[in-house]
Image (cartoon, rainbow, N blue to C red):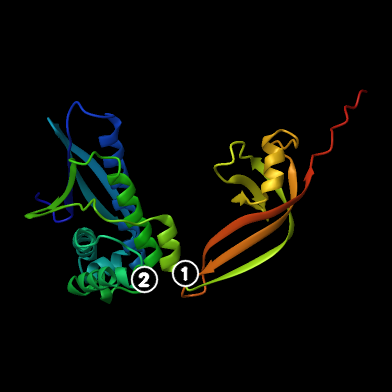
Amino acid sequence: MEQDNAFEIKIDFAPGEGDPTRVFKAMSGLVDAISAFDSHMANSFDVLIDASLVLDSVDPGSIKAKFRDIIAGIPDEQVKEGDWRKVIGVYLIRAKYQLLKWLDGTTKISHRDDIRQLEGSLLRAAEETGLKRLPAYNPPQINLLLSVVHAIKKSLDELQDDEIATYSHGNQSIQINRDFSITLETIREVLTKEAVTSSCIQIVKVKKPDYLGQSMWGLQYDGRSIKARILDGDWLAKFQAREVEVRPGDSLKVLLQEEISYGYEKEVVDRHYEIKKVEQVIHPPTQQRIIF
Protein backbone atom coordinates (compact mmCIF):
# COMPACT_ATOMS: atom_id res chain seq x y z
CA MET A 1 0.00 0.00 0.00
CA GLU A 2 1.42 3.35 -0.98
CA GLN A 3 -0.54 5.74 1.24
CA ASP A 4 0.44 6.11 4.88
CA ASN A 5 -3.22 6.18 5.86
CA ALA A 6 -4.32 3.16 3.80
CA PHE A 7 -5.09 -0.25 5.23
CA GLU A 8 -6.66 -3.50 4.10
CA ILE A 9 -9.11 -6.04 5.50
CA LYS A 10 -9.23 -9.50 3.96
CA ILE A 11 -11.53 -12.39 4.77
CA ASP A 12 -10.58 -15.91 3.65
CA PHE A 13 -13.71 -18.04 3.51
CA ALA A 14 -14.81 -21.51 2.43
CA PRO A 15 -16.51 -21.07 -0.97
CA GLY A 16 -19.72 -22.95 -1.59
CA GLU A 17 -20.38 -23.59 2.10
CA GLY A 18 -22.92 -22.11 4.50
CA ASP A 19 -24.98 -18.97 4.18
CA PRO A 20 -23.32 -16.80 1.49
CA THR A 21 -24.32 -13.59 3.28
CA ARG A 22 -22.13 -14.40 6.29
CA VAL A 23 -18.94 -13.09 4.65
CA PHE A 24 -20.51 -9.79 3.65
CA LYS A 25 -22.10 -9.39 7.09
CA ALA A 26 -18.70 -10.00 8.71
CA MET A 27 -16.95 -7.52 6.40
CA SER A 28 -19.67 -4.89 6.87
CA GLY A 29 -19.55 -5.33 10.65
CA LEU A 30 -15.76 -5.00 10.73
CA VAL A 31 -15.90 -1.87 8.58
CA ASP A 32 -18.51 -0.31 10.91
CA ALA A 33 -16.50 -1.26 14.01
CA ILE A 34 -13.25 0.16 12.66
CA SER A 35 -14.97 3.34 11.46
CA ALA A 36 -16.46 3.75 14.95
CA PHE A 37 -13.00 3.20 16.44
CA ASP A 38 -11.55 5.93 14.21
CA SER A 39 -14.30 8.31 15.31
CA HIS A 40 -13.67 7.53 18.98
CA MET A 41 -9.92 8.13 18.56
CA ALA A 42 -10.58 11.37 16.66
CA ASN A 43 -12.77 12.65 19.49
CA SER A 44 -9.63 12.67 21.63
CA PHE A 45 -8.44 15.77 19.76
CA ASP A 46 -11.62 17.34 18.42
CA VAL A 47 -11.38 16.70 14.67
CA LEU A 48 -13.75 15.16 12.17
CA ILE A 49 -12.75 11.83 10.61
CA ASP A 50 -14.29 10.55 7.40
CA ALA A 51 -13.24 7.03 6.38
CA SER A 52 -13.85 6.25 2.73
CA LEU A 53 -14.05 2.66 1.51
CA VAL A 54 -12.68 1.37 -1.79
CA LEU A 55 -13.41 -2.25 -2.68
CA ASP A 56 -10.19 -3.47 -4.27
CA SER A 57 -10.99 -7.00 -5.39
CA VAL A 58 -12.91 -10.18 -4.75
CA ASP A 59 -10.74 -13.24 -5.29
CA PRO A 60 -11.76 -16.92 -5.28
CA GLY A 61 -12.00 -17.94 -1.65
CA SER A 62 -11.49 -14.43 -0.26
CA ILE A 63 -12.87 -10.91 -0.18
CA LYS A 64 -10.45 -8.03 0.16
CA ALA A 65 -11.12 -4.34 0.66
CA LYS A 66 -8.80 -1.33 0.90
CA PHE A 67 -9.62 1.70 3.01
CA ARG A 68 -8.28 5.18 3.48
CA ASP A 69 -8.76 7.55 6.42
CA ILE A 70 -9.63 11.06 5.23
CA ILE A 71 -8.90 13.70 7.86
CA ALA A 72 -10.94 16.90 8.03
CA GLY A 73 -11.80 19.49 10.66
CA ILE A 74 -8.40 20.87 11.66
CA PRO A 75 -8.20 24.69 11.31
CA ASP A 76 -5.81 25.89 8.59
CA GLU A 77 -3.67 27.81 11.09
CA GLN A 78 -2.96 24.55 12.93
CA VAL A 79 -2.14 22.74 9.68
CA LYS A 80 0.41 25.47 8.86
CA GLU A 81 2.23 24.75 12.11
CA GLY A 82 2.56 21.10 11.19
CA ASP A 83 1.05 18.51 8.86
CA TRP A 84 -1.44 17.38 11.48
CA ARG A 85 -3.75 15.64 9.03
CA LYS A 86 -0.95 13.29 8.03
CA VAL A 87 0.08 12.82 11.66
CA ILE A 88 -3.48 11.92 12.69
CA GLY A 89 -3.77 9.52 9.74
CA VAL A 90 -0.60 7.74 10.87
CA TYR A 91 -1.89 7.64 14.45
CA LEU A 92 -5.20 6.06 13.40
CA ILE A 93 -3.35 3.33 11.51
CA ARG A 94 -1.14 2.63 14.52
CA ALA A 95 -4.12 2.73 16.88
CA LYS A 96 -6.04 0.15 14.84
CA TYR A 97 -3.00 -2.12 14.78
CA GLN A 98 -2.51 -1.75 18.55
CA LEU A 99 -6.18 -2.60 19.11
CA LEU A 100 -5.95 -5.80 17.06
CA LYS A 101 -2.55 -6.71 18.53
CA TRP A 102 -4.04 -6.38 22.01
CA LEU A 103 -6.99 -8.56 20.99
CA ASP A 104 -4.55 -11.15 19.64
CA GLY A 105 -3.36 -11.87 23.17
CA THR A 106 -6.79 -11.67 24.80
CA THR A 107 -9.07 -14.59 25.60
CA LYS A 108 -11.63 -13.04 27.92
CA ILE A 109 -12.51 -9.51 29.02
CA SER A 110 -14.03 -9.70 32.49
CA HIS A 111 -12.41 -6.93 34.53
CA ARG A 112 -11.56 -3.25 34.12
CA ASP A 113 -7.85 -4.03 34.41
CA ASP A 114 -8.07 -6.26 31.31
CA ILE A 115 -8.26 -3.19 29.08
CA ARG A 116 -5.57 -1.11 30.83
CA GLN A 117 -2.88 -2.51 28.54
CA LEU A 118 -4.81 -1.33 25.47
CA GLU A 119 -5.24 2.15 26.95
CA GLY A 120 -1.49 2.29 27.54
CA SER A 121 -0.68 1.19 23.98
CA LEU A 122 -3.00 3.85 22.50
CA LEU A 123 -1.45 6.51 24.74
CA ARG A 124 2.07 5.54 23.63
CA ALA A 125 0.97 5.69 19.98
CA ALA A 126 -0.35 9.23 20.55
CA GLU A 127 2.94 10.25 22.20
CA GLU A 128 5.07 8.72 19.43
CA THR A 129 3.15 10.58 16.73
CA GLY A 130 3.17 13.87 18.65
CA LEU A 131 -0.60 14.05 18.99
CA LYS A 132 -0.50 14.95 22.66
CA ARG A 133 0.65 18.41 21.52
CA LEU A 134 -2.75 19.01 19.89
CA PRO A 135 -5.19 21.12 21.96
CA ALA A 136 -7.81 19.37 24.10
CA TYR A 137 -6.25 15.91 23.84
CA ASN A 138 -7.99 13.33 26.03
CA PRO A 139 -7.45 9.56 26.26
CA PRO A 140 -10.21 7.46 24.63
CA GLN A 141 -13.11 6.50 26.85
CA ILE A 142 -13.13 2.91 28.07
CA ASN A 143 -16.82 2.39 27.32
CA LEU A 144 -16.25 3.35 23.66
CA LEU A 145 -13.29 0.98 23.39
CA LEU A 146 -15.35 -1.87 24.80
CA SER A 147 -18.22 -1.16 22.40
CA VAL A 148 -15.81 -1.45 19.46
CA VAL A 149 -14.37 -4.70 20.80
CA HIS A 150 -17.88 -6.11 21.19
CA ALA A 151 -18.76 -5.06 17.62
CA ILE A 152 -15.64 -6.79 16.27
CA LYS A 153 -16.52 -9.98 18.15
CA LYS A 154 -20.10 -9.89 16.87
CA SER A 155 -18.86 -9.44 13.28
CA LEU A 156 -16.40 -12.33 13.48
CA ASP A 157 -19.09 -14.62 14.88
CA GLU A 158 -20.72 -14.51 11.44
CA LEU A 159 -17.86 -16.59 10.02
CA GLN A 160 -17.41 -20.35 10.09
CA ASP A 161 -14.76 -21.93 12.32
CA ASP A 162 -12.07 -22.27 9.63
CA GLU A 163 -12.53 -18.79 8.15
CA ILE A 164 -10.20 -15.93 9.08
CA ALA A 165 -10.05 -12.15 8.81
CA THR A 166 -6.78 -10.24 8.43
CA TYR A 167 -5.82 -6.58 8.87
CA SER A 168 -2.83 -5.26 6.90
CA HIS A 169 -0.94 -1.99 6.56
CA GLY A 170 2.30 -1.69 4.61
CA ASN A 171 4.47 -4.63 5.67
CA GLN A 172 2.46 -5.27 8.83
CA SER A 173 -0.27 -7.89 8.88
CA ILE A 174 -2.21 -9.43 11.75
CA GLN A 175 -4.91 -12.08 11.87
CA ILE A 176 -7.90 -10.79 13.82
CA ASN A 177 -8.39 -13.01 16.87
CA ARG A 178 -11.75 -14.77 17.01
CA ASP A 179 -11.11 -16.66 20.26
CA PHE A 180 -11.92 -13.97 22.79
CA SER A 181 -15.06 -13.57 24.86
CA ILE A 182 -16.99 -10.40 25.63
CA THR A 183 -20.71 -9.84 26.23
CA LEU A 184 -22.90 -6.81 26.86
CA GLU A 185 -23.36 -8.04 30.44
CA THR A 186 -19.58 -8.17 30.87
CA ILE A 187 -19.22 -4.63 29.52
CA ARG A 188 -21.77 -3.39 32.04
CA GLU A 189 -19.91 -5.12 34.87
CA VAL A 190 -16.53 -3.77 33.76
CA LEU A 191 -17.82 -0.20 33.55
CA THR A 192 -19.84 -0.28 36.79
CA LYS A 193 -18.41 1.00 40.05
CA GLU A 194 -21.65 0.79 42.01
CA ALA A 195 -25.33 0.01 41.44
CA VAL A 196 -28.38 1.48 43.17
CA THR A 197 -31.65 -0.48 43.30
CA SER A 198 -35.09 0.92 44.08
CA SER A 199 -38.67 -0.37 43.85
CA CYS A 200 -41.97 1.50 43.67
CA ILE A 201 -45.42 1.35 42.12
CA GLN A 202 -45.37 2.76 38.59
CA ILE A 203 -47.56 2.80 35.49
CA VAL A 204 -45.87 1.55 32.33
CA LYS A 205 -47.28 1.49 28.81
CA VAL A 206 -47.13 -1.77 26.86
CA LYS A 207 -45.38 -1.60 23.48
CA LYS A 208 -44.64 -5.29 22.89
CA PRO A 209 -46.06 -8.04 25.15
CA ASP A 210 -44.19 -11.32 25.61
CA TYR A 211 -46.74 -13.94 24.60
CA LEU A 212 -44.38 -16.90 24.95
CA GLY A 213 -42.88 -16.05 28.32
CA GLN A 214 -39.31 -16.41 27.02
CA SER A 215 -38.22 -12.80 26.54
CA MET A 216 -38.68 -9.33 27.97
CA TRP A 217 -41.64 -7.05 27.52
CA GLY A 218 -41.21 -3.87 25.53
CA LEU A 219 -42.53 -0.98 27.63
CA GLN A 220 -42.69 2.80 27.77
CA TYR A 221 -41.59 4.29 31.10
CA ASP A 222 -40.60 7.79 32.14
CA GLY A 223 -40.59 9.00 28.55
CA ARG A 224 -38.29 6.28 27.19
CA SER A 225 -38.48 2.74 25.87
CA ILE A 226 -37.36 0.00 28.24
CA LYS A 227 -37.33 -3.78 28.39
CA ALA A 228 -38.35 -5.65 31.52
CA ARG A 229 -38.99 -9.22 32.55
CA ILE A 230 -42.21 -9.88 34.49
CA LEU A 231 -41.49 -12.05 37.53
CA ASP A 232 -45.10 -12.26 38.73
CA GLY A 233 -45.65 -15.94 37.93
CA ASP A 234 -49.33 -16.08 38.89
CA TRP A 235 -50.22 -13.10 36.68
CA LEU A 236 -48.14 -14.43 33.78
CA ALA A 237 -49.94 -17.77 33.95
CA LYS A 238 -53.30 -16.01 33.66
CA PHE A 239 -52.03 -13.84 30.79
CA GLN A 240 -50.70 -16.80 28.82
CA ALA A 241 -53.93 -18.71 29.47
CA ARG A 242 -55.78 -15.68 27.99
CA GLU A 243 -57.61 -15.04 31.25
CA VAL A 244 -56.12 -11.54 31.19
CA GLU A 245 -56.10 -9.49 28.01
CA VAL A 246 -53.21 -7.10 27.34
CA ARG A 247 -52.54 -5.47 23.99
CA PRO A 248 -50.02 -2.90 22.77
CA GLY A 249 -51.23 0.50 23.91
CA ASP A 250 -52.58 -0.80 27.23
CA SER A 251 -50.86 0.16 30.48
CA LEU A 252 -49.88 -1.84 33.54
CA LYS A 253 -49.81 -0.70 37.14
CA VAL A 254 -46.83 -2.59 38.52
CA LEU A 255 -44.26 -2.89 41.27
CA LEU A 256 -41.23 -1.90 39.21
CA GLN A 257 -37.66 -2.55 40.33
CA GLU A 258 -35.04 -0.30 38.74
CA GLU A 259 -31.31 -0.95 39.05
CA ILE A 260 -29.09 1.95 37.92
CA SER A 261 -25.42 1.16 37.35
CA TYR A 262 -22.97 4.06 37.78
CA GLY A 263 -19.48 4.24 36.32
CA TYR A 264 -16.24 5.48 37.85
CA GLU A 265 -17.05 9.09 36.94
CA LYS A 266 -20.62 8.81 38.30
CA GLU A 267 -22.05 8.49 34.79
CA VAL A 268 -25.05 6.20 34.21
CA VAL A 269 -23.77 2.99 32.61
CA ASP A 270 -26.99 1.00 32.45
CA ARG A 271 -30.58 0.79 33.69
CA HIS A 272 -32.05 -2.64 34.35
CA TYR A 273 -35.75 -3.23 35.04
CA GLU A 274 -37.81 -6.06 36.51
CA ILE A 275 -41.52 -6.18 37.28
CA LYS A 276 -42.05 -7.86 40.63
CA LYS A 277 -45.85 -7.73 40.61
CA VAL A 278 -48.63 -6.67 38.26
CA GLU A 279 -51.34 -4.82 40.16
CA GLN A 280 -53.72 -3.83 37.36
CA VAL A 281 -54.23 -3.71 33.59
CA ILE A 282 -55.34 -0.29 32.37
CA HIS A 283 -57.05 -0.18 28.98
CA PRO A 284 -57.16 3.12 27.09
CA PRO A 285 -60.57 4.85 27.16
CA THR A 286 -62.89 3.95 24.30
CA GLN A 287 -63.04 6.70 21.74
CA GLN A 288 -66.58 8.03 21.40
CA ARG A 289 -67.66 8.55 17.85
CA ILE A 290 -69.18 12.00 17.32
CA ILE A 291 -71.78 12.35 14.58
CA PHE A 292 -72.60 15.83 13.30
Instruction: Answer above or below: position of 148 versus 155.
Output: below
Mark yes or no: residue 192 visible: yes
Question: Which residue in the structure is indicated by mark 1?
Answer: 192
Q: Amino acid at mark 1?
A: Thr
Q: Residues within 10 Å of mark 2 (few under 14, many from 20)?
A: some
Number of numbered discs visible in the structure rendering: 2
Residue sitting at the far right: 292
Question: Looking at the rendered structure, which numbered label has been put on residue 112?
Answer: 2
Question: Looking at the rendered structure, which numbered label has been put on residue 21?
Answer: none
Given residues 126 and 289, the one toward you in this image is: 289
Q: Residues within 10 Å of mark 1 (few under 14, many from 20)?
A: many
* Image quarter of residue 106: bottom left
Q: CA distance from mark 2 to mark 1?
A: 9 Å
Q: Residue at x 84, y 38 (%)?
A: 285
Q: Is residue 230 left or right of residue 48?
A: right
Q: In the image, residue 245 lies at what x, y percent?
A: 74, 35
Mark yes or no: residue 226 visible: no
Ranked by sequence position, the earlier of labels 2 and 1 is 2
Helix, strand or loop at disc 1? Answer: loop
Q: In the image, residue 225 lies at what x, y percent?
A: 61, 49
Q: Amino acid at mark 2?
A: Arg
Q: Is residue 137 left or right of residue 232?
A: left
Residue sitting at the far left: 171
Given residues 108 and 132, the one toward you in this image is: 108
